[in-house]
Each structure stands twice: as C-alpha cells, then as structure tokens.
Amino acid sequence: MTTVCIDGFNLALQQGSGIATYARNLLVDLNAIGYETQVLYGPKGKIGDNDALNEAILVDSERSGKPPKRASRYLRTMAATVGVSAHFIPRTGRVIWPEDGAAQPPAASFWSSRDLFRTSHRAFQRYGTTSRLHFTGAPKPDIIHWTTPLPLHAAGSVNICTIHDLIPLRLPHSTSDDKKSFYDLFKKSAGTSDHIITVSETTRNDVISSLGVPEDKVTNVYQSVSIPQHALGMSDFELSRNLFEVFGLKWKDYFIHYGNIEPKKNLGRLFESFSQAETARTLVIVGGKGWLRENEISLMQQVVSLESPLAKRVIYLEYLPLITLVGLVRGARATLFPSLYEGFGLPIVESMALGTAVLTSNFGAPKEIASSAAALVNPLSVGSIKLGIEALDRDNNLLRRLEHDGRKRALQFSPEHTQARLKEVYQRLHG
C-alpha cells in the first residue's frame, strides 16, 4: 500500500487553525482513497525506546521537553543545513489524546524529529538552506504532503506542497511578517516540491504569477469540507433551546462572524456596517487572536464600553469548542464574512453545509467559492455591507433561497469531489 505522510506543524496547535482543519480533512480524504497515512511531528521532547512515552510526547509536543540551551540550539541549526532525521513511532492505543485542538489525527502511525519545525526555520533564516529529511526505523513514506510551505524536503519521496494563499504579498498591510522571508520560503518550497496543490483557482493564479511556477506544476483541488457527525448531535429544537439558555439567543434571530481576528477578515468595517444597519438583531463574533487585531476591534471595544443599546446586541466570544461553534452557526440567521482576501474561505462552505445563509465578498476566492449562492457585497464599502445585512435582515424569501442554494453549493466541496481530484494528482506523480 502506498504510504503518505503529512506534516503535523499545525496539527500540534492546542487551539487549532484553518490549516489544521485542512490537514485533518486531508488525512480523511487520503484514507478514503486507500492510502496508508502518517503524520510527522516536531516535538520539544526527546524520543526514546518506549513507544507509549514517545506517543505521549507527541500529544503534548509543545510542552514536553525543556527548551534547548543556546549552544545546543546552535549545533542543531548547523546540523539541519546538512539534514535531519525522523524516527518512526507506532500508534500504541495506550495514550488518550484530547478531543479538540491537538486531537489524535486519523493516521496509522507517526514520525518524530525533535524540534523539527523551529530548527529548520532557523536554518533557513540564517543560511537559506532547505533541510533534507531522512526517515529511520521503518520504510520512508512514498509521498510526503506538506500542508503549508516549510523549509524541508523529504529525500527519496515525492514531495507535494499545498499553498493556501499569498496574503503577505497580495495584501501586505494585513500581516506583520517579513515579506521577503515569506517570499523566499514560498519560492524555495515551490521550487523543491514535485507539485503544488492549491485550494482555489484564485490562489493557483497567484502562485503562477507571483512565484513564477509553471502552470503544469500547480493543480487546484479545492478543499474538502465536512462537519463531524458528533458536532451535529442536537435536533433543531434542542439546539434552539440550548442557544437561548446558554447565550440568550433566539433561533435564526442573530448574525454571526467567526474566524481569527486579523485585518484581512475586515471585522472593523463589518462592525461599522452593522452599527449603521437598520436591524434589531444581535451580532455574535467568535474569533481567536490573530495578526494586528487591535485596529479591527477598537470600534467594537469602544461601543461595548459605553454600554449603549448597540452594545447589548454584540456578543464577543474568543474561542469555542467545535460543537458549540457548529451550534452557533446552525442557529444563526446568516454568517457575515466580507473578507478582503482568502485562499479559500472555509466559513463560507461550512455555513452553507449547515444550512445557514452567507454574506461574503464580491471578488477573489470568496466570490469563486460562494458563486451565486451567497449575498455578495463590496468588502471595501461600509454602505454595500450595510445594505447586504439589511437585505438578509428583512427578506425571508432571499434568506430561504440562499439557504437552499448554499446547501447545493457546499456539495461541490464534499469529500468525494476533493478525493477524486486528489487521487488524479497523486496517481500522476506516483503511479
């Protein structure tokens, strides 16, 4: 059986990320196609001969182990310019993984290389080198799929890399990272990979034009979107009662915006639009801390501090378990997502799949993904967003149409569709 290993760079995060969701769905898709899947971790802790202990270190990879001393860190960084080794770790079944965040990935086995991702990044930043990865303790994977560009290359395996977006190059004011370092890493990764996968035609075109990658080396397979069954346990009636008891919210009587709070999400302009819109409904904002969030939430914080009538219609929640978030999206009248730039726009499809109407941007990937199944607005215009909110607030016929069309549109991003596209790329590279 062909083995495929993906990196666990984002899978180890305690609160997850969009790329972590992508990585989990990718594993599900690869398992369904018929590949044996593995995950490569880079924990702080040192791996030994005890398989159960090794797996426990992976579960707690960000905390298990002392940070290396300066001399040790320097030597590891130097060594990474020559190469790094990953050690095989079987799945023991004796370790209890968390249910959310860094949950157990649906993979048959694991690889571990101590402090791999930090060390390889330091080597790249200091010396401009990509670390060659070697596998020990079991046969190397046939294919390694990097879920985001990393300064690593698996020797003797087919290397595939997913590029989700080029936001620092396309919307530079929205991120605080070093733009040249970003460009150098993505350019290098694109050059050393055997093939590039993107999650939208928008990103595919950006990769070709901005990184100079040949067209035949980049394939858009879109992104597989599925809602875990355990998150859909409650009936509409039960969920309606729960939402009111926990949050004081009525079924389909509030708007929701969710995702990391960062400039590209356009939350500042969305809140300004909501504050001007003629609506009595509540706005629920669910967002973790992202890049440069202060400017995005400053108006909201000022309004809330005044304890005005508008402030009573705003609920801000920083982080929620998946089941709670899914329930809030299901119960919302509409998801408001007027993003300035996306590689895909996961909340668009998730909301559609849950039967919730969507308002999103009229250009770029959001328009590509939503097509005609969402209320499209100019994300740069407070007036346009305001009119979109008011239309969704008043027009029940529009709402029903978007709910219906959204469910149909979400099917285009079902696991089955993505699996067919992935299989074609994989078979072309590794028959």
Image (cartoon, helix red, strand yellow):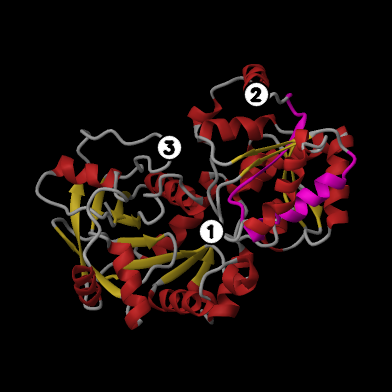
Looking at the image, is mark 3 or mark 1 earlier in the sequence?
A: 3
Question: Among all residues in the image, which is located at the extreme front?
Answer: 306
| Residue 192 or residue 119, whichever sits in front | 119
Quarter location, residue 380? bottom right
| Residue 85 or residue 53, whichever sits in front | 53
Disc count in the image?
A: 3
Q: Position of residue 166 (x, y in %)?
A: 57, 69
Residue where numbered disc 1 is placed? 221
Task: Give the structural element (helix, strand or loop) at label 3.
Answer: loop
- Visible in this render: residue 217? yes
- Is the residue 361 above or below the residue 155 in the image? above
| Residue displayed at 84% across by 56% down | 382
- Is the residue 244 above or below the residue 41 in the image? above
Mark 2 belongs to which amino acid?
A: Leu
| Residue displayed at 77% across by 36% down | 307
Residue where numbered disc 2 is placed? 243
Residue where numbered disc 3 is placed? 100
| Residue displayed at 55% across by 59% down | 199
Q: Which residues are magenta?
A: 250-278
Do the numbered discs 2 and 1 sit on residues whose CB atoms are within 8 Å? no
Quarter location, residue 43? bottom left
Q: Position of residue 18 (x, y in %)?
A: 52, 51
Distance of label 3 from label 2 (alpha carbons): 21 Å
Task: Give the structural element (helix, strand or loop) at label 1.
Answer: loop
Quarter location, residue 5? bottom left
| Residue 302 or residue 246, whichever sits in front | 302
Mark 1 belongs to which amino acid?
A: Val
